């Protein structure tokens, strides 16, 4: 609290005191008291006023400082009302009581919302697990159909699977700490898992996938990373050009390892690149082609940040020979992992 | 014939899986009563058990624990619960492999074969022979009366796929699927290029007409 703020709060009181002092001085002068005595009285009055106001200011100031320190020390600011000190007087007690009541209702609302979102997440997860059984059954049954029907049905089933998978990982990304286990994995294994999961889409898109130098190991969660790669592979298939080729390679960067996924697809315009990881962003390609949700890359970024993987994207749309998109995943060095 | 026990509570999956396993030359043993799976396994002595985790009553983890004590058969968990934690738990309880639903049949078959091979329950031939052509799968070489030559990984898998079913027409799509199973991710054009190269190598051995193209249908080994 500054002195100006303090004075402006007490302006009325101070003006009233000054008026009283002035009229008392006028009265004393009028009734024959010597002007020297009046001046002494005024000075005495002023000194007393100065002292009391200074003490009051210092008390307010230190009280506010104390409360602010408590607030600054709190991780969850809405818990402030639970940590407030004893009230100094009746007025403050009343005020603090009001705060406390407001705070309690806030804490209740927050924990209700938390519980609701937790329940929702659990429901989504169990739903996803349940839906996988009929998808598996449909996949097995459709093997009995003719080749054309089988091809069409398996494509649709693969799409359902991809949507379900995204829903699952969206729910998982809400409270990531529960679900992933960091351990040493070969990049080749992650790549094989991701490619296998999307093989129907990739084969039907007539894509050639080249893998190179993937013998190195990184510390990460295999399933989460495979999901991220899967999203990138789906994008490569979705925005492919003629004779699509996807290459997966790895290279060391100091202590870290980079996994590079490159396609020769239609590319992303330069002005859209900074926004591709935003939630719901579809861009011109997505709008022209349709069926784009704008969730894939958003989820990639969220999951990657949980795993401390750095994601970079580069794209070329103009130059025929270099056209395509390149996504680089930089895995953390073993020593830099904050969670294991 | 190798016996594979299917412990799966979804009827559609159980029946289809039994059919597919039968077509692949296994003897499927579908379980319909989930009250005492370990005892049933003891009686029928399967060579491998496909075990779902989410079962009525006792779950797959508990069953696997009991199986470990009494039955020596390897266990592959087949489940829709696929977090890393589930996988770690499954494998630490003595499961031999873990496959997440929805799986593709080629993958399931490959895993079944791999587990059986690891457990020494199956011995696959290392050399395939058709019409005087011998394919050594380990060395990646072909030999005929006229001499020997080595193959690339892609050529080897294409030829192996054709030689496993001599006389049958194998569609390009099936060939591509088989190659993808072996982590060779090629497209249609690359397949054509590889087949042409393979024919070139075969003709050096005097077998240039071995692989026949059936227009619109695929390839045939004659």
Image (cartoon, coloured by chain):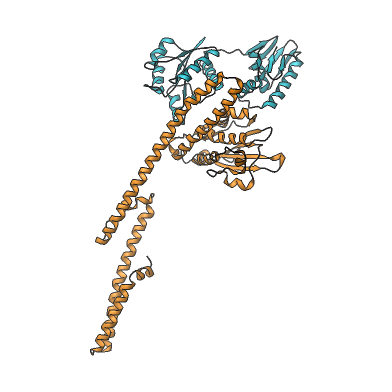
Chain colours: A orange, B cyan
Q: How many marks?
A: 0
Q: Position of residue A122 (x, y in %)?
A: 41, 35
Q: Residue A240 vs residue B122: left or right?
A: right
In the displayed structure, A67 sits above or below A330; it is below
Q: Look at the image and tell me whether residue B4 can be seen.
A: yes
What residue is rendered at 39% in x and 20% in y? B63
Q: Position of residue B200 (x, y in %)?
A: 75, 19
Q: Residue B184 vs residue B47: left or right?
A: right
**The C terminus of chain B lies in quadrant:** top right
Q: Nearer the viewer, residue A290 or A33?
A: A290
Q: Nearer the viewer, residue A23 or A49?
A: A23
Q: Nearer the viewer, residue B85 or A253?
A: B85
Q: Position of residue B145 (x, y in %)?
A: 74, 10
In the displayed structure, A111 sits above or below A71; it is above
Q: Quadrant of residue B91?
A: top left
Q: Quadrant of residue B147?
A: top right
What residue is rendered at 64% in x and 33% in y? A246
Q: Look at the image and tell me whether residue A340 can be seen.
A: no
What residue is rendered at 66% in x and 33% in y? A244
Q: Position of residue B211 (x, y in %)?
A: 71, 15
The single residue placed furthest to the left in the displayed view is A31
């Amino acid at each position: 609290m500054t002195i100006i703020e303090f004075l402006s709060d007490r302006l009325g009181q101070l003006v009233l005191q000054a008026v009283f002092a002035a009229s008392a001085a006028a009265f004393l002068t009028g009734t024959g008291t010597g002007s020297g005595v009046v001046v002494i009285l005024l000075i005495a009055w002023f000194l007393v006023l100065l002292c009391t106001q200074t003490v009051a200011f210092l008390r307010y100031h230190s009280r506010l400082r104390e409360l602010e320190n408590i607030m600054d020390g709190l991780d969850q600011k809405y818990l402030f009302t639970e940590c407030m000190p004893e009230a100094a007087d009746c007025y403050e007690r009343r005020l603090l009581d009001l705060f406390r009541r407001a705070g309690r209702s806030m804490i209740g609302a927050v924990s209700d919302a938390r519980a609701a979102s937790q329940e929702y997440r659990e429901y989504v997860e169990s739903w996803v697990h349940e839906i996988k059984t009929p998808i598996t059954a449909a996949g097995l049954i459709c093997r009995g159909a003719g080749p054309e029907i089988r091809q069409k049905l398996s494509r649709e089933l693969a799409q359902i699977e991809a949507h379900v998978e995204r829903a699952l990982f969206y729910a998982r990304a809400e409270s990531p700490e529960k679900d992933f286990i960091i351990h040493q994995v070969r990049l080749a294994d992650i790549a094989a898992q991701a490619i296998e999961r999307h093989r129907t889409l990739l084969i039907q898109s007539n894509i050639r996938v080249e893998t190179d130098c993937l013998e190195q190991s990184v510390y990460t969660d295999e399933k989460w990373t495979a999901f991220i790669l899967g999203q990138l592979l789906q994008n490569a298939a979705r925005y492919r050009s003629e004779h699509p080729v996807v290459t997966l390679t790895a290279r060391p960067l100091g202590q870290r390892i980079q996994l590079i996924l490159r396609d020769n697809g239609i590319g992303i315009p330069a002005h859209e690149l900074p926004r591709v990881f935003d939630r719901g962003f579809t861009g011109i390609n997505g709008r022209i082609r349709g069926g784009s949700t704008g969730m894939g890359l958003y989820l990639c970024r969220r999951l990657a940040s949980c795993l401390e993987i750095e994601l970079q994207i580069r794209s070329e749309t103009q130059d025929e020979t270099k056209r395509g998109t390149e996504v680089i995943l930089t895995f953390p060095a073993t020593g830099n992992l904050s969670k294991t | 014939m190798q016996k594979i026990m299917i412990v799966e509570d979804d009827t559609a999956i159980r029946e289809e899986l039994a059919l597919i396993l039968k077509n692949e030359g296994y003897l499927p043993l579908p379980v319909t009563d989930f009250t005492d799976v370990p005892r049933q396994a003891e009686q029928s002595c399967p060579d491998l058990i496909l075990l779902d985790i989410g079962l009525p009553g006792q779950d797959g983890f508990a069953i696997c624990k009991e199986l470990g004590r009494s039955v020596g058969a390897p266990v592959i968990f087949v489940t829709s619960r696929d977090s890393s934690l589930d996988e770690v738990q499954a494998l630490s309880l003595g499961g031999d492999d873990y496959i997440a639903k929805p799986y593709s049949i080629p993958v399931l078959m490959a895993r079944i074969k791999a587990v059986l091979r690891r457990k020494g329950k199956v011995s696959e031939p290392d050399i395939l022979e058709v019409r005087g052509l011998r394919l050594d799968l380990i060395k990646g070489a072909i030999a005929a009366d006229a001499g020997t030559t080595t193959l690339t990984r892609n050529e080897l898998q294409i030829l192996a796929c054709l030689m496993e079913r001599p006389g049958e027409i194998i569609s390009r799509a099936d060939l591509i699927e088989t190659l993808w199973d072996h982590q060779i991710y090629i497209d249609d054009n690359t397949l054509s290029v590889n087949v042409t190269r393979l024919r070139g190598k075969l003709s050096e051995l005097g077998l240039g007409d071995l692989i026949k193209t059936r227009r619109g249908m695929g390839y045939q080994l004659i």
